[in-house]
Amino acid sequence: MRIKEFTSAYWQQLLFLLVAVVLFCFWAYVRPDKVVVRETFQMFLWNVDYLADRVAVPGGFARYSGEFLVQFFKFVTLGAAIYALLFTFIMRFSWILLKRAIPAFNKVFLLVLSCLLTVYLCYLACDIEVATTLQMAVFSVLTLMLALPKRRIQSLICSLFLIPIGYWLIGPVVVAFPLYHLSWLREKGSRMKTVIESMAMILLLTISVIVSSKFVPYQMEELAKGLDYVMIQKGMFGTDEEIEYDYLQRLRDWEGIVKKSHKEPPSSLSCEYTVVLAKYYTNFCTDDELKLTLQHPDKVLTSGAAAMIMSDHYMHMGFTNMAQKTAFDAMECVSDYNKSARAMVRLVETNIIIGEFDVALKYISILEETLFYRNWAMQMKEYALHPEKIKNSPVYGPLQKIYGETVDVFFF
């Protein structure tokens, strides 16, 4: 088969493959910090209680499935691949549904519409305040709509069942069902029936929201907008600048941090301190200049990302108590009453160093129920149960020695 014939026969598949590649490159190389930061402020647990806690509220399944995917964002490549597949499937499914709903329209125009939806969802994904719950809810409702019968009455009956169930599982995005049902307006003999049926579905969705408010401790407005679609506690995570510097510091890309600061001086105090640390490691800063970053501890902790930055920063400098305090602050900045596996890892480390082994074991028992922190937690358990092994650790041994030789003072 010639290339031209192959392209003509499989142009749809090739197009969506191209979209997936572009999306992967965007998340893996342009905004990797936006991928990693989501996992930073989450801790997905593999136990029944965690699942029950999520599905006990409207939209809980979408949140649970979104958080399930985000646990893989610990690795940029894997997270970028998941995002690429998710958004490509959303584009593909929405295009199929648009062709079914309005077949008279040009296919290329409908493809552009589905592309715009994907671009908008990607734009929202760049905002850390918008949870992955929203994208999973959209994906779920599109999948359910694809399974609807192609006849109006059968589609109506299925939709009437799916709206209350779907609202509890994935949230208010099920409003797409009555909107999709309006596609039957193309049948002249049933236009009035179609409008009435769509209004009935919207009424059913409204009743579902009202009834659910009687069982969960959330305001009606939050239930109508979607729980965890957008963070209820906004402004906790930090600025884009702090997220970018935090990502670079985690990579220990000291030269990259210095270059970034030369292009545009950081505005956040935590980012300024990160630049000083990077200059120290690249031999452009003295010990005395680095010690100046211990100043203004009450002003530097402006967000969760800033607290994460400073916790790592203080660990680099050997100030275990200060690293522990900032890890607690980072945990408190996690929105929607979630936990941070990264902050909990730091709390395990600091408690091992300072000798609070029972506290460390408590955090270790929680991390053992995660996927990617389990093995690390089991290794740290050995230190908690056998403290004599700590001195042989190339990381925690020196830090324990420093802690033992310095005055034990509280952060503030």
Image: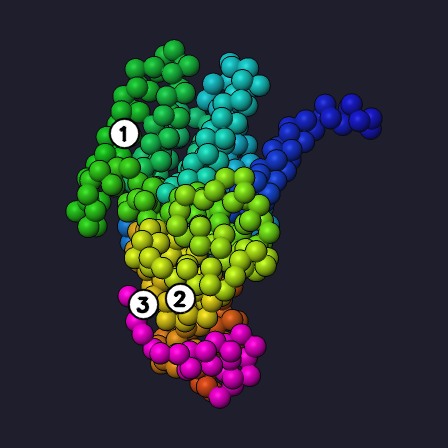
User: In front here: 407 or 107?
Assistant: 407
Q: Residue 128, percent across and down? A: 41, 44
Quadrant housing residue 145: top left
Q: Distance between the residues labelled 2 and 3?
A: 9 Å
Write down the region rendered in magenta.
388-412
User: In front here: 153 or 234?
Assistant: 234
User: In front here: 306 or 330?
Assistant: 306
Q: Which of marks 2 and 3 is nearer the N terminus?
A: 2
* Quadrant where the image shows the C terminus: bottom left
Q: Does the magenta stretch include residue 401?
A: yes
Q: Distance between the residues labelled 2 and 1?
A: 51 Å
Q: In this view, does 184 lie above or below 82?
A: above
Q: Residue at 38% across / 16% down in the picture? A: 185
Return the residue at label 3: 411
* Quadrant where the image shows the N terminus: top right
Which of pointers 2 and 3 indicates the residue nearer the eye?
Answer: 3
Q: Is residue 132 visible?
A: no
Image position of 154 (left or right of 209): right
Mark 1 packing: few (<14 Cα in 10 Å), some, or many (20+)? many
Q: Residue 349, percent across and down? A: 44, 72
Q: Earlier in the sequence, mark 1 or mark 3?
A: 1
Q: In this view, does 343 lie above or below 2?
A: below
Q: What residue type is labelled 3?
A: Phe
Q: Chief secondary structure of the magenta span? A: helix
Q: Which amino acid does label 2 sit on?
A: Ala
Return the residue at label 2: 323
Furthest-left residue in view? 214
Task: Indicate the secondary structure of the residue bearing disc 2.
Answer: helix
Return the residue at label 1: 202
